[in-house]
Image: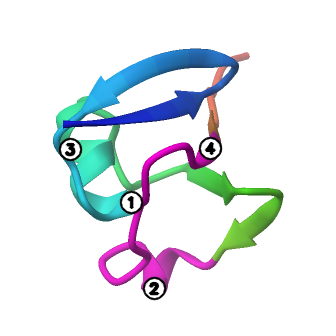
Amino acid sequence: MMGLKINGDERQVASSTIETLLGELKISLAGVAVELNGEIVRKENYGTASLREGDVLEIVTLVGGG
């Protein structure tokens, strides 16, 4: 387990990449944007973008409506 700050909240997670983190958090890859330590991560890099203790992430999901 490692400590990350996700959307302003301290969390303990087992994930080692953004892709596995999104799965752990039950967030679909469709319509999501992730910022890691102030840098936007391209969706094609979610599987290789490594997470480290103390990283700060902002995860934004798009919500449709009318």
Q: Quadrant location of residue 7?
A: top right
Q: Amino acid at mark 1?
A: Ile
Q: Nearer the viewer, mark 2 or mark 1?
A: 1
Element class at badge 1? helix
Q: Nearer the viewer, mark 3 or mark 4?
A: 4
Mark 4 vs mark 1, CA separation in Å: 9 Å
Q: Earlier in the sequence, mark 3 or mark 1?
A: 1
Nearer to us in this view, 2 or 8: 2
Which residues, given as a range, are shown in magenta?
Answer: 42-57
Q: Earlier in the sequence, mark 4 or mark 1?
A: 1
Per the image, is 41 magenta? no
Mark 4 Cα-neighbour bin, 10 Å: few <14, some 14–19, many ≥20: many
Residue at mark 4:
57
Q: Position of residue 52 (x, y in %)?
A: 43, 58
Q: Position of residue 24 (x, y in %)?
A: 19, 36
The residue shown at (20%, 44%) is 23
Residue at mark 2:
44
Q: Say which quadrant the C terminus sits in.
A: top right
Q: Earlier in the sequence, mark 2 or mark 1?
A: 1
Residue at mark 3:
23
Q: Say which quadrant the N terminus sits in.
A: top left
Mark 2 vs mark 4, CA separation in Å: 17 Å
